[in-house]
């Protein structure tokens, strides 16, 4: 009799424990950028919002600066179920399909208003492509407009010929080549070392990355050319997401919507604040000369024509929607 009672009690305890543990879940989330990057700060707040709104049923552990997976591997890590969620730079996928890189086309969308319009035109196509890979976009946030960092003062594209130029995607590699520069792939955490060793001599990136990398230690001039506003996306493995309770799914989606809205505002603030940081640390901040801007715009126009030829009907549809009044 005592043995039966003990087994009953043990069974109840096990059931309660099993239910309790089944309700709690923890997701590892790899991100490519350091803790102080505004994208990372936004993700950390997103994770806090998810944990708070689900009352601890879902916790997201953020692994920053490529510590869990290298940037180039994050998308496939989520796709393969090694991790349920991750962040990456969208145009890194341009080699898979050119439509992933439309937001990195030089001088196509150069303001936040235009970047938002372009994302609305691009999102449906991108979401469909990622859906086929078992991925769902939770939200997207742009970087501040991309500027030019160089060691010496320049007044035209001609001044960049032969310069070792940092590239982070196929589009920037092509642009560097068209400028006559020598493109070299370098991830954000490796920027200071790449400049210190002479691996690169110039780059186009946001004021955020420039400030976080302490660009004033290795270059002297920043040109606010506002070339494009590329985006990061946060994606989730669809199967993993669907296994969540409906209430948890809704909490994740609400936190994602808040993160997107907050992230766009953070990006706008970053543009002003981090450009000031560059100047405060001794960098000469320039407006581009009219000649330089005209030359860059001509290169951008050529690259858009090439992009459309590669992207096909999907690319043309994106541009038609973007250019529509």
Image (cartoon, grey):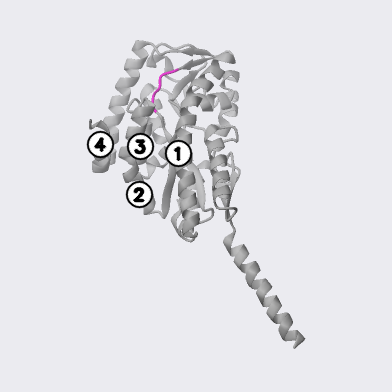
Query: Is residue 300 rendered to the left or right of residue 140?
Result: left
Pointers 4 and 2 in contact (CB under 8 A)? no
Query: Is residue 301 rendered to the left or right of residue 228?
Result: left
Q: Earlier in the sequence, mark 2 or mark 3?
A: 3
Q: Which of marks 4 and 2 is nearer the N terminus?
A: 2
Q: Mark 1 points at which residue?
A: 260
Q: For the residue labelled by badge 1, is the local secondary structure a helix, a strand or a loop?
A: helix
Q: Where is residue 176 in the image (x, y as percent from the top left)?
A: 40, 26
Cα gap from disc 2 to disc 3, whole angstroms: 15 Å
Res. 77 mark: none
* Secondary structure predominantly adopted by residues drawn in magenta: loop
Q: For the residue labelled by badge 2, is the local secondary structure a helix, a strand or a loop?
A: helix
Q: Which of marks 2 and 1 is nearer the N terminus?
A: 2
Cα gap from disc 4 to disc 2, whole angstroms: 18 Å
> Does the image show residue 311?
yes
Q: Position of residue 318 (x, y in %)?
A: 27, 38
Q: Could you tell me which residue is drawn at 43 percent across and 25 percent down? A: 145
Q: Earlier in the sequence, mark 4 or mark 3?
A: 3
Q: Earlier in the sequence, mark 1 or mark 3?
A: 3
Comparing labels 4 and 2, the label whose residue is closer to the camera: 4
The magenta segment: 224-228
Q: Mark 4 points at which residue?
A: 321
Comparing labels 1 and 4, the label whose residue is closer to the camera: 1
Quadrant for the C terminus, please.
top left
Q: Could you tell me which residue is drawn at 54 percent across and 14 percent down? A: 279
In the rendered view, tell whether residue 207 sits above or below residue 136. above
Q: Quadrant of residue 198?
A: top right
């Amino acid at each position: 009799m005592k043995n039966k009672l003990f087994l009953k009690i043990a069974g109840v305890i096990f059931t309660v424990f099993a239910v309790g543990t089944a309700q709690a879940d923890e997701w590892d989330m790899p991100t490519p950028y350091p803790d102080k990057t505004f994208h990372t700060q936004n993700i950390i707040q997103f994770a806090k919002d998810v944990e708070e709104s689900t009352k601890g049923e879902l916790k997201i552990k953020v692994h920053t600066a490529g510590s869990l997976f290298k940037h180039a591997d994050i998308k496939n890590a989520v796709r393969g179920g090694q991790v349920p969620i991750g962040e990456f730079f969208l145009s890194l996928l341009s080699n898979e399909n050119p439509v992933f890189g439309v937001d990195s086309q030089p001088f196509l969308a150069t303001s936040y208003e235009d970047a938002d319009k372009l994302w609305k035109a691009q999102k449906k196509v991108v979401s469909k492509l990622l859906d086929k890979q078992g991925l769902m976009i939770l939200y997207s946030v742009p970087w501040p407009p991309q500027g030019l960092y160089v060691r010496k003062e320049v007044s035209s594209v001609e001044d960049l010929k032969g310069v070792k130029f940092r590239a982070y995607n196929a589009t920037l590699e092509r642009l560097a080549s068209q400028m006559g520069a020598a493109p070299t792939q370098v991830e954000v955490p490796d920027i200071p070392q790449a400049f210190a060793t002479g691996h690169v001599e110039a780059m186009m990136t946001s004021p955020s990355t420039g400030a976080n990398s302490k660009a004033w230690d290795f270059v002297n001039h920043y040109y606010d050319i506002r070339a494009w506003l590329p985006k990061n996306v946060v994606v989730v493995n669809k199967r993993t997401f669907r296994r969540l309770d409906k209430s948890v799914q809704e909490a994740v989606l609400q936190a994602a919507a808040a993160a997107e809205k907050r992230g766009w505002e953070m990006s706008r603030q970053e543009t002003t604040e981090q450009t000031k940081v560059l100047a405060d640390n001794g960098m000469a901040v320039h407006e581009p000369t009219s000649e330089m801007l005209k030359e860059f715009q001509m290169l951008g126009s050529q690259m858009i024509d090439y992009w459309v030829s590669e992207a096909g009907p999907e690319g043309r549809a994106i541009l038609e929607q973007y250019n529509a009044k």
